[in-house]
Amino acid sequence: MASGSRRGGLGWFILIALVVAIGVAVFFLWPKLEGQAPRLTLGRQPTHLGRDYHLNLTVSDQGAGLQSLSVQLIQGSRVKTVWHRTFPAPPQGRPSAAPTAVEVSINPRQLGLEDGPATLVIEARDHSWRQWWHGNLTRRECKVIIDTIPPNLRLLSRGLYINRGGSAMVVYETDPEVKDHGVQVGQRRYQGYGPWPRKPNLRVCFFAYSQGQKRGVPIRLWVRDPGGNRTEMKLPVGVRWKRFRHATLNISDRFLQEILPRFRSVLPTDRTKPIDLFVWINTELRRRNNQQIGKAVSSPAGAMLFSGVFSRPQGKTMAGFPDRRRYLYHGKPISRATHLGTDVADVTNAPIRATAAGRVVHAGPLGIYGNTVILDHGLGVASLYGHLSVVEVKTGQTVTRNQRIGTSGATGLALGDHLHFSVLVGGVFVDPLEWWDPHWIRDNVMSRLREAGVATPAGDKAKGRSRDGG
């Protein structure tokens, strides 16, 4: 009996030890046998590869960890390794590494490949022991066109001039299939458009020479194709260097008592003095509001929704663009700002009308501008109507020239009843006086179109355009 008991106990001990050993083995080996393949995400799906294409991708593995990542380009029987990298296995029991972002530069010419069809192959493997110790595989194939020839670019406009703080328009010709194009003034890019469906090679771009732009910056016309190939040329533009008016405004305690309650919901809590709160409104809130305006006009219609000169709001001009304002309080300078529009005053609660046909992209409160309407006129051109007492349109609504959109007022950072009117080109505030001037429109818009031999790109309702009422 004793011997049988000892043998039975030994058997149980061996069985328990075996179960423990299997459990330990499973604990340590199971992560190596996981079957989840790496995750591979492309920044954008490539369709064309130019002379120097940059492929952005992100790869991660939630199990055994990333083992390798490779990029190959295949054309016929030629297989070219563009990029390859191996990764060490993560320590046992440690969580998987964060996603790895990779940028791969691809130059098909240096790889000895020709223009034409090819296949881009991206492979990611992990450290799993699956697939006979080769690891789980994620493979992505992209059919691409190798195109290393820079796009064509031909200027059709002549005799270009632009005022400091003003606007200009250029017409040019490119290949029909391009990715983006336009004008670059210094570091600022202005997007071009192709508003003539029957002439897909013709392009137009409205651009500005910002009132804050340095003197003598280069102005260039550029185009980029889907493969990233770029062609650019110097744009022969004469810049008229205008001087701007300087104005001094005295801030009174009465003004502060009137204005500050309007901004109570947005004022910072770490400032208590009324004058400090005004300075914050005049600088930081102004900056934020101008960012909001830039966002509102950042997706303009690709068609010209207006036609001809903008109509001028009725009333007397009270302040111009872009007055350099210095603010004094008890005789001491406290703040500075640039007035990015023209103030027009008529009778109290005067009707405010759209200066040109367009689409409402903002209708409501806007900080220092008070109740505001912003209209998109297409091709990067927009107008702003600030300090309104009443807004009579809604965002998304289409309006015609001279359609009533609200009434004048003294909301926002304003005391007397007036309209603050601004024009923007490519998100940059420009001189509204130009757009009210028939001679400027004739010389800088209509003449550009005649030089190129094209009609005004407006009025084709089938293409989502609308003709204004003037």
Image (spheres, rainbow, N blue to C red):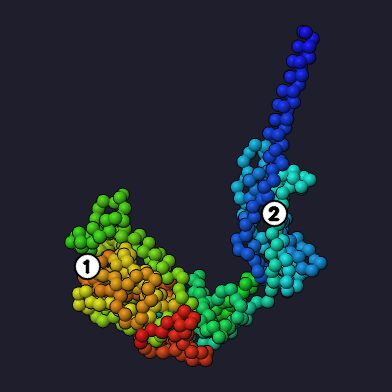
Residue farthest left in this picture: 254
**In the image, residue 147 lies at what x, y percent?**
69, 74
Q: Quadrant of residue 425?
A: bottom left
Closest to the observer, 182 or 333: 182
Closest to the observer, 66 or 191: 66
- Disc 2 element: strand
Closest to the observer, 298 or 258: 298
* Residue 389 seen in render: yes
At horizontal 71% and vertical 34% (from top left) the residue drawn is: 26
Q: Residues within 10 Å of mark 1 (few under 14, many from 20)?
A: few
- Disc 1 element: loop
Q: Is residue 286 left or right of residue 90?
A: left
The disc placed on residue 415 is 1
Q: Is residue 243 left or right of residue 144?
A: left
The nearer-to-camera label among 1 and 2 is: 2
Does the CB distance between marks 1 and 2 fall below 8 Å? no
At horizontal 34% and vertical 70% (from top left) the residue drawn is: 394
* Residue 168 seen in render: no
Q: Quadrant of residue 164?
A: bottom left
**In the image, residue 14 lies at what x, y percent?**
76, 21
Residue farthest right in this picture: 77
Q: Quadrant of residue 444?
A: bottom left
Disc 2: which residue: 138
**In the image, residue 402 lies at what x, y percent?**
32, 82
Question: Three-letter amino acid code at disc 1?
Answer: Leu
Q: Which comes sooner in the sequence, label 1 or label 2?
A: 2
**In the image, residue 341 lies at what x, y percent?**
33, 74
Question: Three-letter amino acid code at disc 2?
Answer: Thr
At horizontal 62% and vertical 55% (from top left) the residue drawn is: 58
Residue farthest front in this picture: 1
